[in-house]
Image (tube, grey):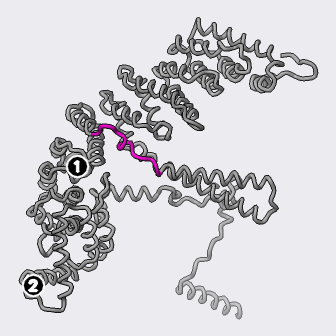
Amino acid sequence: MHPKGNNRFPLNLPHLQNCIKKDPTAYQEEFQVQYRHYESILQILMMNPAYFDKQFESLVTFLAHTVPCYKDRVEFPEQLINLLRNYSTGLHRDSRLACCKALMILRSRNFVPLTSLLPLFFELSKCQDKSLRSYIRQNIVSDIRALNKKSRNEKVNKELQKFMYDKLSNEQQIVEAKLALDIMIELYKKSVWQSRDLVNQIAFACQSRTSKILVTALQFFLGTDEEAGEDEDDKDDEDSKVEKLNQLKETLKANKFNKSTRKREKILAKVKKTVNSIDKKEKNENINFSALHLINDPQTLAEKLLSGVQSTTEKFEVKLMMMSLISRLIGAHELLVLNFYSYIAKYLQPHQTDVTRILQYAAQATHKLVPPEDLEHVVKAITYNFVTDRSSSEAITVGLNAIREICARNSEVMDEDLLQDLTQYQKYKNKNVSSAAKSLIHLYRIKNPNLLSRKDRGRPLDDSLKRTHSVMSLEDDEMNFETEEEDEDSYMELETDDDQSIQDDEFGEWEEAEGDGEEEDEGDAEEEEDEDAEGEDENEKLLNPSDKVRLEDIERLYKRPRHDKESRLATVIEGRQGRGKYGQKKPKLNEKSSTSNRDKRRNKAFGMIKHKLKRHKKTKTFHEKQLELKQKLIRQERAKR
């Protein structure tokens, strides 16, 4: 480039790009020179696609920014599209990525429609280039978000969704189907596309024969991928929120004591806007519903998933995910898939891998509409395999916890004989087992106290029992309502006639059982204090169990187990994290400062520093002092002579 008048022309492409954007007509000749250079490299690439030139990447980026300033260069995006379509696999990876970036820059300037770029990008996803695939996915998601940011264009959205649905349904092109599924899931999580049609298309992908598509769709409904990165995201969000609030406090304090100016008012308004945006984002996240409730036909989906998990040859982890989704569907929509209980019962063995998760799925799939006869297979399998004297205390605890969670959702599954056998474990020597049995007794004190033995029914005058009976009377049938009213009347008679003698034998026996229970409670007063404190909170959980069973409720151990060698070593290693090395000297206050003379002396030879060592005088013994005094006296006598 040559100087023109007193001005000097730019010597690099970014400077020329800036000048062209300011005044396109004045720099049209320079633009033509660069465009001819680009065309010459393009012809070389068509003859030899593997050829790589570093100038091509900078030229394409420069033209992508400046071509919209000249309307006569409409053929530039078409040339890039044809180059990528014809030589997608043969091009150098950097040249291919540069062309894609240039097309996305033109797309951001509305120079190219998104509908014409999507087929090209899905074809490019077949290339063995992971960075290119991630770049394509991120830019498609961000572009569709930008389209729906200010106002929703339903016509364009329907066209894009139809394209995604077609790609997802074509399982012959696995890479394209996986990319379409990833884009749809990410747009749903970002609250851009949250329609029923989208969720049902993802639900259709749960029946796919391809492992990657199947696992991705299952993770979307189960939410496992969100839980994995949930903690890190929450920490980052909390830190950013604290920083913004501190900044707001500082600006408010500065405006309070300093003179109010327009600049300070603008800064204050900007900080308030960012804090309000964080609060709005948190509110929107709380309103977000689960995708499970948007499925049109959950019964058919659950049945197809059950037939699929019975005949699939996938890994056991994938089977667990399918069982988890079936149980969530049954619990959320109160479905009747009776074959699921007999299928899951064969996995209820203590030696089974991830057996606590399978117990969680069994409890999750239980609701009040399931016939008790079908649930008996599950409860009996847990009882015979876990709650036996030959099992370990941990297995018995897990089994009792699982039975409690199942009975909390359908109390009719338990018969009187089995319940009384299970309640005998309240006197078991292990505290975990006894506490789990007491929690089962506490459940049936609320649900159906008639199944318990008379001594386990508890005190009838308990205020929490009255409150829970009143809550249960609103939810249960008329027959249960009448029986519970009779029980409450009998309890009230006991309260009024407390001072009088009771002649009825039945009430007399009740009082004797109460007296025995009080003596036992006095002996175990320290253990019962904690359970009574948690009793009120557990009542609400037992009366209104959530659809999703927590794994902690089944694996819950009331007493911490003894540490073995591996657990002790794990705690030791965990305590060493973030701690300095043992025996290491303290670091310097200033890393650039020199070492002291004392530190330098440690690296020197002993012969060089022994004369500088301060030697302490050796203390003399009593015998040495005697000899020294004797010699001194002898010398004095000789001196007198």
- Residue 289 part of the magenta segment: yes
User: Does residue 605 appear anywhere in the picture?
Assistant: no
**Residue stretch rendered in magenta on the structure:** 286-298
Counting residues from the start of the chain, the first of labels 1 and 2 encountered is 1
Residue 608 figure quarter: bottom right
Residue topped by disc 2? 508
Mark 1 and mark 2: Cα distance apart in space:
42 Å
Q: In this view, which residue lies farthest toward the top?
A: 47
Q: In this view, which residue lies farthest toward the left?
A: 505
Looking at the image, residue 63 sits to the left or right of residue 461; the answer is right
Q: Residue at x 63, y 91 (%)?
A: 633
Q: Residue at x 18, y 59 (%)?
A: 411
Q: In front here: 468 or 173?
A: 468
Q: Residue at x 18, y 88 (%)?
A: 498
Picture layout, residue 291 above or below residue 453: above
Quadrant of the drawing holding the N terminus: top right
Amino acid type at circle 2 is: Gly
Looking at the image, residue 205 sits to the left or right of residue 136; the answer is left
For label 1, count other residues whose C-alpha is less than 10 Å away and answer few (under 14), some (14-19) or many (20+).
Answer: many
Q: Which mark is residue 362?
A: 1
For label 2, count other residues whose C-alpha is less than 10 Å away and answer few (under 14), some (14-19) or many (20+).
Answer: few
User: Does residue 358 appear anywhere in the picture?
Assistant: yes
Picture layout, residue 49 above or below residue 400: above
- Residue 606 part of the magenta segment: no
Looking at the image, residue 612 sits to the left or right of residue 498; the answer is right
Picture layout, residue 89 above or below residue 65: above
Q: Secondary structure at mark 2?
A: helix
Q: Are marks 1 and 2 in contact (CB under 8 Å)?
A: no
Q: Secondary structure at mark 1?
A: helix
Q: Can you give x and y, in whole percent of width and height, for residue 52 in the image?
A: 61, 15
